[in-house]
Structure formats: C-alpha cells, structure tokens
Image: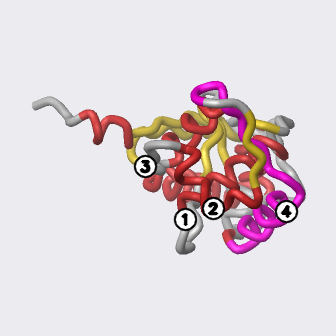
Amino acid sequence: MDTPASEERKMSEIEVSLHGHSFKACGPAEELTKQFHAFVQSVEKELGAPGDGQGKAESHATAEAGVSPSATIPSGLFMKHENVLILTQIPRTKQSNADALLLLLYGFRTLLGQERAMGTRLMKAATATGLKIDRLARVIAPNAEYVHMEGTGKSRAYALNGKGVGRAEQLARTLA
C-alpha cells in the first residue's frame, strides 16, 4: 500500500557518528529528536559526561552533524541534515509557527553565519522541522516587527532585525 504524500513529507532521516558510536534513524522529526537525545545521553554516560542530554557529547554531535556550537544557543536546539537546518523543538506559544520561523532565522544567522535566508531555504528548514506552512510571509506576519523582508515571491529574503535577534534569543532560552 502506498503511503500518502503528506505522510512522506513528515519523515526525516539522520545519521551521526560520535566518539565511535553511530546513530542512524528515519521517522517523524519529533521522534528523531527524542531518539537523538537518548543516543547522546547514552554516549555521555559512557564517556562520563553529565547525563542531562545537554552536555559535551551533544555539542560534539551537533558539530559533527554540520552545525557550529554557539554560546547563545541552547545545546541541541538545532541540527543540520543534508544542508538543511532543523529546529529540534517547536515553541509552545500562541503563534508557534511564527516563533519557530524566528528561531530558524536565528539559527541561519548564528550557526550558519547567514544574516538573511532566502525564502526557499527557510521553507525547506521549516518543512524539515515539521511545520505546516503554506506561505512564509503569511505565517511570519505576527512577527513582522522582528523581521526584515526584501524581494518578492521565491526570491524573497528574510532577516532578523535587532529586536528580532532579542526575541529569538528570548525564545531560545525558554526552550533550554
């Protein structure tokens, strides 16, 4: 029996090697995140690192997955897979999708060194994160005061302004 296209889009894959241990999984992003954190905890336990799932091993795993660690970003908040930035936790706010987009823009800025993200890359990141978004501009509208947009259509670029960086850092701390 064929899987509906909507279910296929929800599936993600990750493969990480960490201190001689391998983690390879396929499934919904939320489940992968849980499994990844359990993997990191088991490696930390074996290495004698703090076993809270947020220690040294996870920072190494994040770096090995292609994401540079940053002091202002809680460990494990982002991961990168096949050149797509993924937010591992979605904020539980009234405007969770809009806030998740702010966090993704923050990840582009701080982890990837990109002040702005093209709409197509931001949409790929949002989809990989598990967000259901039809149009970026419409979803990000509640946070318009935090985002600078330039261009139109598929060539639109999004960037956090000064207030947006502060708001994204505040959101990131609540997810820590």
Residue placed under numbered mark 2 in the picture: 99
Do the CB atoms of the residues marked 2 and 1 lie less than 8 Å apart?
Answer: yes
Q: Nearer the viewer, residue 90 or 41?
A: 90
Callout 3–callout 4 Cβ contact below 8 Å: no
On the image, which quarter does residue 142 sit in?
Answer: bottom right
Q: Earlier in the sequence, mark 2 or mark 3?
A: 2
Residue 15 in magenta stretch: no
The numbered dot on residue 132 is 3
Viewer-nearest residue: 149 or 57: 149
For label 1, the residue is 96
Q: The residue under label 4 is which amino acid type?
A: Lys
> Callout 2: few (<14), some (14-19), or many (20+) C-alpha neighbours within 10 Å?
many
Badge 1: how crowded within 10 Å, few (<14), some, or many (20+)? some
Residue 116, percent from left and from top: 79, 37
Q: Amino acid at mark 1?
A: Ser
Query: Between marks 2 and 3, how big is the CA–CA gap?
Result: 13 Å
**Percent coordinates x, y for residue 145 in the rendering:** 75, 60
Q: Is residue 167 above or below residue 5?
A: below
> The magenta stretch spans which residues?
153-174
Measure how far apart labels 2 and 1 are at the Cα level. 5 Å
Query: Is residue 76 visible in the rendered structure shown here?
Result: yes
Whether residue 169 is in magenta: the answer is: yes
Distance of mark 3 from mark 1, alpha carbons? 11 Å
Looking at the image, tell me whether mark 3 or mark 4 is earlier in sequence order: 3
Marks 4 and 2 sit apart, C-alpha to C-alpha, by 13 Å
- For marks 4 and 2, give the one nearer the viewer: 4
